[in-house]
Image (cartoon, helix red, strand yellow):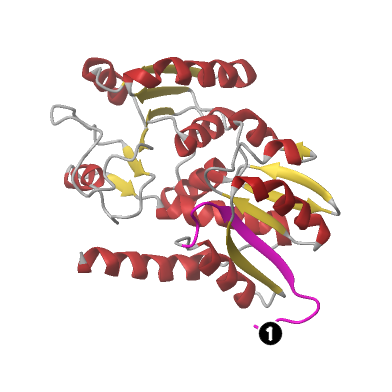
C-alpha cells in the first residue's frame, strides 16, 4: 500500500492499546481490497479524548474504534447513536458521516454474525445463558434481545446483581425480551437454565489464566448446546476444553473480535471485509501461540 495525499485514516483509541491486533485486521482488509486507507492504534489519556474525536472531522477520517475506558466517555462528543449503541450505553465504533459523528456498537452484531456464519446459529426464539455482564456481556445481551431471543438468563457475581438488574430493566423495557439475573454461585438455577438453553456464553475474565473456569464441576452441559467464550487468549480456555470434551460445538472470542471489526469496516467503507483470509491468519497466529505455551 502506498500512502499519498488521498489516504484516509482510521484508528483504535484506548489506554492501553499498543497490544491491539485491530491494526493488523483493518490494514489487511485495506490492502486486500485496494482501498486507500490506513489504520493506527492511538494510546491516549482521557484528557485528550474530546480533541481526538474532533480530529475525526478535522482530518476527514473514516472514523475510530474505541476500547476501554472510552466506550461510554465518548458518547457526549457524538451527534447521534445507533439503536444498539443506545441500548448498550456504549460505543465501539464512530462513523464520520459527512462530518456528522454517529456512534455504533458492533460487538454483539459481530458476535452473532460469527455464530450464524460458522454454525448457522440464529438467536431468534432461542434461550441464552450468559455468564458475566461487563462490556462484552452487555453487548451480547442487548443484541440478542434486539434480534428476538426468547429468553436470556444472566449470571453474575453477587456484588454485581444490583448493577446488572438496572441494565436488564432498561433492555427489557425497550425490547420486551424475557431477561433474568442470578448469582453465578447459584448452581441449581444455573443448571435449570442450561437444561433449556441453546447457547452458553462466558463473558467473564475467568479462563484468561488458562486455569480457572466460571462453571463448577457439578454442572452438566446438554448435547444440543452451542458454547462460546469471549476470551481468545488462551486459544482454548478450560471452559471450552470441558465443553469440547463433552462433544459440544465451541468457539472462542476470536470470531467476535474479527466480525465486530468487519461490521465497523463496512460502516466506514461500504465494503465487505475479506474475513475468511483474515480468519485463517488469526487462527494460525493464536493456534501457534497456544502450541508454544
- For label 1, the crowd category at 10 Å Cα-Cα, with few meaning under 14, some 14 to 19 and many 20 or more, is few
From the viewer's perspective, is residue 183 above or below residue 131?
above
Q: Which residue is rendered at x = 70% and y = 43% of the image?
A: 103
Q: Which residue is rendered at x = 53% and y = 41% of the image?
A: 108
Q: Which residue is rendered at x = 43% and y = 16% of the image?
A: 180
Which quadrant would residue 234 be assigned to in this image? bottom left
- Left/right of residue 65 with respect to residue 178 in the rendered view: right
Q: Is residue 232 magenta?
A: no
Q: Is residue 13 magenta?
A: yes
Q: What stretch of residues is rendered in magenta? A: 1-18
Q: Quadrant of the N terminus?
A: bottom right
Residue furthest to the left in view is: 218
**What x and y, as percent, mark residue 191?**
24, 21
Q: Which residue is rendered at x = 28% and y = 39% of the image?
A: 206
- In this figure, which residue is indicated by the disc labeled 1? 2
Is residue 170 or residue 251 the one in the foreground?
A: 170
Is residue 226 or residue 161 the one in the foreground?
A: 161
Q: Quadrant of the C terminus?
A: bottom left
**What x and y, as percent, mark residue 228?**
35, 43
Element at badge 1? loop
Residue furthest to the front in view is: 47
- Left/right of residue 20 with respect to residue 173 in the rendered view: left
**What x and y, as percent, mark residue 291?**
21, 67
Q: Can I make out residue 270 in this image?
A: no
- Left/right of residue 201 with respect to residue 143 in the rendered view: left
Amino acid at each position: 500500500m502506498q500512502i499519498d495525499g488521498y489516504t484516509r485514516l482510521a484508528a483504535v483509541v484506548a489506554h492501553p492499546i499498543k497490544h491491539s491486533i485491530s491494526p493488523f485486521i483493518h490494514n489487511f482488509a485495506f490492502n486486500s481490497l485496494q482501498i486507500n486507507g490506513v489504520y493506527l492504534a492511538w494510546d491516549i489519556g482521557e484528557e485528550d479524548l474530546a480533541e481526538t474525536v474532533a480530529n475525526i472531522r478535522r482530518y476527514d477520517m473514516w472514523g475510530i474504534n474505541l476500547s476501554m475506558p472510552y466506550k461510554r466517555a465518548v458518547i457526549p462528543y457524538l451527534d447521534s447513536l445507533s439503536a444498539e449503541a443506545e441500548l448498550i450505553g456504549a460505543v465501539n465504533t464512530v462513523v464520520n458521516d459527512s462530518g456528522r459523528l454517529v456512534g455504533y456498537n458492533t460487538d454483539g452484531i459481530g458476535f452473532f454474525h460469527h455464530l450464524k456464519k460458522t454454525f448457522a446459529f440464529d438467536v431468534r426464539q432461542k434461550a441464552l445463558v450468559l455468564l458475566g455482564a461487563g462490556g462484552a456481556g452487555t453487548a451480547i445481551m442487548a443484541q440478542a434481545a434486539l434480534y428476538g431471543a426468547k429468553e436470556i438468563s444472566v449470571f453474575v457475581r453477587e456484588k454485581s446483581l444490583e448493577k446488572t438488574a438496572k441494565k436488564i430493566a432498561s433492555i427489557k423495557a425497550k425490547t420486551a425480551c424475557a431477561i433474568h439475573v442470578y448469582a453465578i454461585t447459584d448452581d441449581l438455577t444455573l443448571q435449570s437454565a442450561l437444561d433449556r438453553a441453546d447457547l452458553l456464553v462466558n463473558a467473564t475474565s475467568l479462563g484468561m489464566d488458562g486455569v480457572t473456569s466460571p462453571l463448577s464441576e457439578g454442572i452438566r452441559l446438554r448435547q444440543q448446546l452451542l458454547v462460546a467464550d469471549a476470551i481468545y487468549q488462551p486459544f482454548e480456555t478450560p471452559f471450552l476444553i470441558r465443553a469440547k470434551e463433552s462433544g459440544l460445538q465451541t468457539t472462542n472470542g476470536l470470531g467476535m473480535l474479527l466480525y465486530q471489526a468487519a461490521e465497523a469496516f463496512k460502516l466506514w467503507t461500504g465494503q465487505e471485509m475479506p474475513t475468511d483470509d483474515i480468519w485463517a491468519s488469526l487462527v494460525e497466529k493464536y493456534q501457534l501461540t497456544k502450541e508454544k505455551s
